[in-house]
């Protein structure tokens, strides 16, 4: 996997995406120490953007940095996932309640993003889905609440990648979004908030199943 063709300003982000994918699919296992020289060569990037990428992955919980030893892969665990993932069904509906019914232009953007999501796969699907949710909550006046949601989005991304690799899960997300948009168009904010909560909960079981299967296969 070479990232040389990626625009310079996006190299660190692309490198982080590549390493995150390696963690999710098992090429980098829990506890593995990252060899920065080999990894930089493999990705076709210099050490500086790679280190920026690795530092970002430490911040989101995917890696652990140990002084004088380097970077190590943090294990994907059911315990961590359940503790993190159950927070957004509480936060997002409250943010939408505070934001109120979006403007017509915002609803049009939501519809466009949802259409884009139907054609997206893997990491791109996660990016579009995240953009959809942030557009939905764009008018929320509570900046701290939005910052909390953004931090959780980053923290759960390595788990979401496993979810969005399955096209049926992408389809479930787009259908959930359609129900939320329909409620907003009808001016029914409580129903939209309830539909949003269900949407935030819909990915839980597929990821839990994936994590359990991943653990079982490692133990055999």
Image: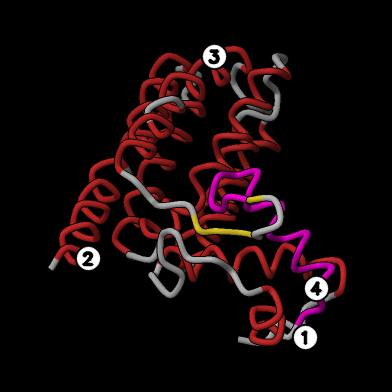
Residue 179 highlighted magenta (yes or no): no
Q: Along the line of sight, which residue is nearer the eye, 86 or 187? A: 86
Which residue, as the protein is rendered here, is positioned at the far front?
68
Residue drawn where x is 73% and y is 86% of the image: 44
Front-lying residue, 138 or 85: 85
Q: Does the magenta stretch include residue 53?
A: yes
Q: How far apart are marks 4 and 3 (CA)?
A: 44 Å
Mark 1 or mark 2: whose residue is earlier in sequence: 1
Q: Which of marks 4 and 1 is nearer the N terminus?
A: 1
Mark 2, residue position: 218
Residue at 27%, 53% in the rendered image? 211
- Looking at the image, which is closer to me, 17 or 146? 17
Would residue 57 be found to the left or right of residue 73 on screen?
Answer: right
Residue under label 1, please give it: 5
Assess whether mark 2 and mark 1 are in contact (beta carbons under 8 angstroms).
no
User: Residue at point 50% right, 20% down?
Assistant: 91
* Numbered label attached to residue 97: 3
Of labels 4 and 3, the one closer to you? 4
Residue ID for mark 4: 47
Judged from the image, the secondary structure of the residue bearing numbered disc 2 is helix
User: Residue 74, how many percent across, how many down?
Assistant: 48, 52
Q: Which of marks 3 and 2 is nearer the N terminus?
A: 3
Of the image marks 1 and 3, the number of the one nearer the N terminus: 1
Name the quadrant of the N terminus. bottom right
Residue range of the region highlighted in magenta in the rendering = 45-65
Alpha carbon separation for disc pair 1 and 2 = 35 Å
């Amino acid at each position: 996997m070479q990232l040389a063709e990626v625009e310079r300003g996006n190299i660190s982000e692309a490198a982080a995406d590549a390493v995150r994918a390696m963690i999710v699919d098992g090429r980098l296992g829990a506890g593995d120490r990252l060899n920065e020289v080999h990894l930089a060569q493999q990705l076709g990037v210099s050490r500086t953007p790679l280190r920026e990428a690795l530092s970002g992955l430490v911040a989101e919980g995917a890696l652990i940095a140990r002084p004088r030893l380097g970077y190590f892969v943090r294990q994907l665990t059911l315990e961590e996932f359940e503790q993190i993932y159950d927070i957004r069904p509480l936060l997002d509906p409250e943010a939408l309640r505070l934001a109120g019914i979006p403007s017509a232009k915002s609803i049009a953007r939501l519809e466009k993003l949802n259409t884009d999501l139907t054609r997206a796969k893997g990491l791109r699907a996660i990016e579009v889905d995240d953009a959809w949710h942030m557009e939905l909550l764009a008018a929320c006046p509570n900046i701290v609440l939005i910052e909390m949601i953004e931090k959780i989005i980053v923290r759960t991304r390595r788990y979401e990648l496993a979810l969005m690799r399955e096209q049926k899960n992408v389809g479930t997300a787009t259908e959930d979004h359609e129900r939320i948009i329909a409620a907003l168009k009808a001016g029914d904010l409580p129903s939209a908030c309830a539909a949003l909560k269900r949407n935030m909960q819909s990915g839980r079981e597929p990821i839990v199943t994936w994590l359990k299967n991943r653990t079982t296969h490692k133990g055999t």
